Amino acid sequence: MVEVPGKLLVLQAMALCFVLYRQNQQATDCPPPYRSIERIVERVEVRNSVEATRNTGSRIEERNRLSKMINEMMKGIKLQYCETLKQRKSKKEKIDTTEEREYCSEDADASARMFDKQLSKAMAHLMEGQRAAGIGDRHGKFKRQMDVYTRVSSYDSYDGSPYIENITNNAVRFLDLTVPQYGLPLYDWLVCLEVAHHVPREFQDILVDNLARHARTGIILSWAPPGPDSVHHVNELMPEEVDKVMKKVGFSLDSYSTKLLTDAAMRPWAKKNVRVYERDPGVKADKDEA
């Protein structure tokens, strides 16, 4: 197990930087409905956290608490930003539609347009009897289908939209993959479809580490390659590049399972981009790292 203190200090530094940043900003550019993030920041007690972590158990608890706090901060930042975009859009100002589309959309039909029922059936067979989670599950379409199939023992859903918990009545929970995530369950399988290429390259390692840390057995991943359909994509990789990225965190391509899923899939993006990775035998999952 990697030592916790170093990671704890990183999370503490992130929290402190956020506090200082917000003090400078004073929320003057933030819409009134979302200034409640200031109250979240006011409850942060960073300065005494080192003294509170004298043994491994308390260090892990403190690390997880800070991670959850930072995730909540990121949701507040995104809410503020999305509301600002709405205001600018209402004034007919030109805005960056990439951010609006990726995590500011409240359109429930967006997930339906990406859903692949045949792919979901094949995934349910692959993960049968296992505990799984969808990362970037939009409005929970894959979760609802997995619950219908009842093949997996459980299927949780997460997404990076700051509106997702309100839209889905908390069926899908907010999770920002660009910051280190701790305190989540250690799942048998993670499903991360059509997310990675929307995450900027500078956050790629954090994204992949988050996935690897919470998958005991395998990861079902799609990552778009460079091409003409790359609208709104900021970090495309060729399949062999994705294989190398996953290998660095202890996961190798399962060609057989990949073919099972891509043969079953109906959507072009799924047939082209979906790949299955299994944890290497010599790389053990550690629940204390999740």
Image: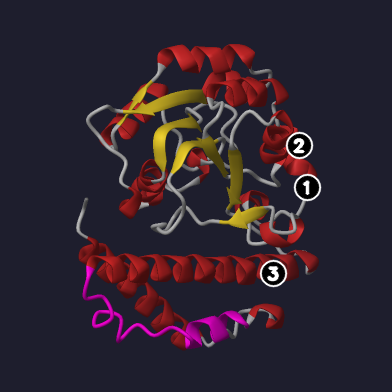
Q: Badge 3 is on which residue?
A: 83
User: How far from the left and from the top, in percent, is residue 124?
Assistant: 61, 26
Mark nearest the camera among 3 and 1 is 1
Can I make out residue 199 in this image? yes
Few, some or many C-alpha atoms within 10 Å of disc 1 (few <14, some 14-19, many ≥20)?
some
Q: Earlier in the sequence, mark 2 or mark 3?
A: 3
Numbered badge on residue 112: 2
Q: Are marks 2 and 1 in contact (CB under 8 Å)?
A: yes
Task: Give me the residue at 66% from left, 45% from top.
Answer: 138
What amino acid is found at the position of numbered circle 3 in the picture? Glu
Q: Badge 1 is on which residue?
A: 108
Could you tell me which secondary element the residue under label 3 belongs to?
helix
Q: Is residue 16 above or below residue 281?
A: below
Of residue 144 and residue 73, the one placed in the foreground of this image is 144
Task: Give me the residue at 72% from left, 68% from top.
Answer: 88
What is the CA distance from the residue labelled 2 to the residue labelled 1? 7 Å
